[in-house]
Image (cartoon, rainbow, N blue to C red):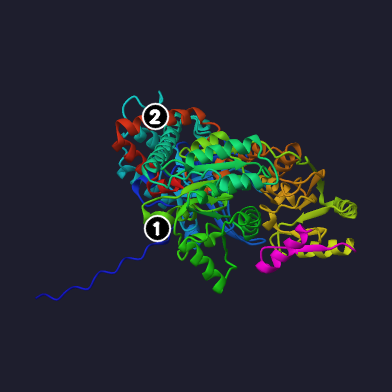
Amino acid sequence: MPEAKPPVPNKPKSAPQKAMEKLGLLRDIDLALHLPLRYEDETRIDPIAAAREGQTVQIEGVVTESRVELRNRRQLLVTVEDASGELLLRFLNFYPSQQKQMAPGQRLRVRGELRGGFFGREMVHPTVKPVNEDTPLATSLTPVYPASAGLPQAYLRKAVAAGLARAPLAEVLPVGSLPPGLPTLREALNFLHHPPPRVALATLEDHSHPAWQRLKFEELLAQQISQLRARRERADLCAPALRAAPGGLHEKLLAVLPFGLTRAQQRVCEEIAQDLAKPAPMHRLLQGDVGSGKTVVAALAAAVAIDAGWQCALMAPTEILAEQHFRKLVQWLEPLGVKVAWLTGSVKGKTRQKMLDAAADGSAQLVLGTHAVIEDKVQFARLGLAIIDEQHRFGVAQRLALRKKLASQALEPHLLMMSATPIPRTLAMTYFADLEVSTIDELPPGRSPIVTKVFADDKRASVIARIRDEVEKGAQVYWVCPLIEESEALDLKNATETHAELTAHLSGHRVGLLHGRMPAAEKAAVMSLFSQNQMSVLVATTVIEVGVDVPNASLMVIEHAERFGLAQLHQLRGRVGRGAKASVCVLVYTGPLSPTGKDRLRAMAETTDGFEIARRDLEIRGPGEFMGARQSGAELLRFADLQEDSALLKAARDLAPRLLERDAGAAERHVERWLGTKAEFLKA
């Protein structure tokens, strides 16, 4: 027998190949859809004398002089001449091979920005290509692609061109289904990768060209199909039908609540109850402004599940928020006989095992906690309802993990997601097309309006004086800092320093400190003192962003407010105004402010409406950043703009159900082409 040959080892990947993988350029279609950021015009030559300063131009000439000079640093200076004049090329970093490439007598094609220099007009570090007199010009604009370290444009251009040539770009969509006036997909991509020189650049840059419109429509359609399919798949799944028993826990909870529900709370409770009663999994987003009373709605939903003999799990992003829910729900439900388990990272040893056992054997009817709730070791006997608070703070995989906690019984739990960051309607239509949305659009009575004031950092002393006045009257104050300790990159006051400063200025009043690196027991002790009005001022990082409810706190100071996002500022502001006292939020900034920083602070000063804040946040940040790309790490809309492309979105929403009905295969191929594995993200 011939001797077996040893296996050929895998050839190691080059740096450009690794960089392409990081960019997600794995398939030919990925390369074909990797579109240019901008274009360079290498289709024409400008005479040196005709080029104007500040322009990016391409000239061609012969090197008349090449020398290295030692001024402040070593520089390569090359003089190029054409029939109209001469130009100096300056290179501050260069290799010997480049110097040899630009020797006297060599013809060069040079592209760069023309500047006025001390020794005449020049280009600094232009793109240089040795040519002959008969070297042809480019016939189309040269694409400049999004790249990363270790991925040269020349390598990427070659890879994209090869991928574009190989990619399966046959028309998938039926004839007549596209908005009128759009090219085929192959025509659109060929055009965008290699546009002719006479195309209006403005239509490429603002994405209004029909080729861009075709891609945006395709992308929106893929997303709409995927979400519609997810909704239909969910309708085929089974979930326990949960109904409150007459005279049971749900009615008892309503009877013992120390307040009445608002009309908005009553409406959303009814919407949720109708979903829970169906044998298909609920997939509902409950959104409401800060302080609108989402927790009691969650408690009533949990009561329906427990009434029906099933368990409920509630997951919150931070221990402080989870603990806030725990305190409220225990206060409301334990007197009614409900057993509540508590699972966070800080619950250890025998206590943790006891909680795990209670969840697994079903004796814990309500399980509250942080990410710990979705760990593999956590098993539920009969999980009927999963509630995720501040759902945008969790990743897609985490949300999917909680939904699969009942998979062994061939059932899915109902899913209720809650958010105090309202999502504008257009955004919800696109990102949550498979999701029912309930909105609490009114605040409970008795909430005091919050006045927002903006001060520069040089008014810090007067802000501290205002704090002294407030605490002397018995009020409580938050002071929020963005960092825990000094950072060389950001010259910010930290929480520890501010705590020492306020302690010195407010003698006779207790000033507490709260930040994320403190042990859980210490954090709980500090919050307990503040909640019981045994502490006048709480200096904290953003761990208090959500879930902290102290009605006596009426003044919020946010230091370096320009460093926070608009939604985060609104969340922090919502920690005050929770009682009858008139409340004030003071935003202290350090100048100079960026245009975005000015827009954020202006929005905060002008409105306390969470939906208006969300609309402005969308304007400032754009949809991808606003949604955090649905926390998947992969942006689901690369080309379409939800505000500008509403007509395309409507056309895609209209076509998606028709395509699924008439040609499910075409719909499947279309989603696979555009989303690949990302389609899973739309199910969470």
SS class, disc 2: helix
Sequence order check, earlier mark of 2 and 1: 1
Do we see residue 313 in this rendering? yes
Q: Quadrant of the N terminus?
A: bottom left
Q: Amino acid at mark 2?
A: Leu
| Residue 162 vs residue 535, the one in the foreground | 535
Residue at 45% in and 62% down? 379
Q: Amino acid at mark 1?
A: Gln
Q: Which residues are magenta?
A: 508-532
State the mark number for residue 655.
2
State the mark number for residue 126.
none
Question: Residue 509: within the magenta?
Answer: yes
Question: Residue 585: within the magenta?
Answer: no
Relative to 248, 120 lies left or right: right
Quadrant for residue 7, please give it: bottom left
Residue at 51% in and 32% down? 201
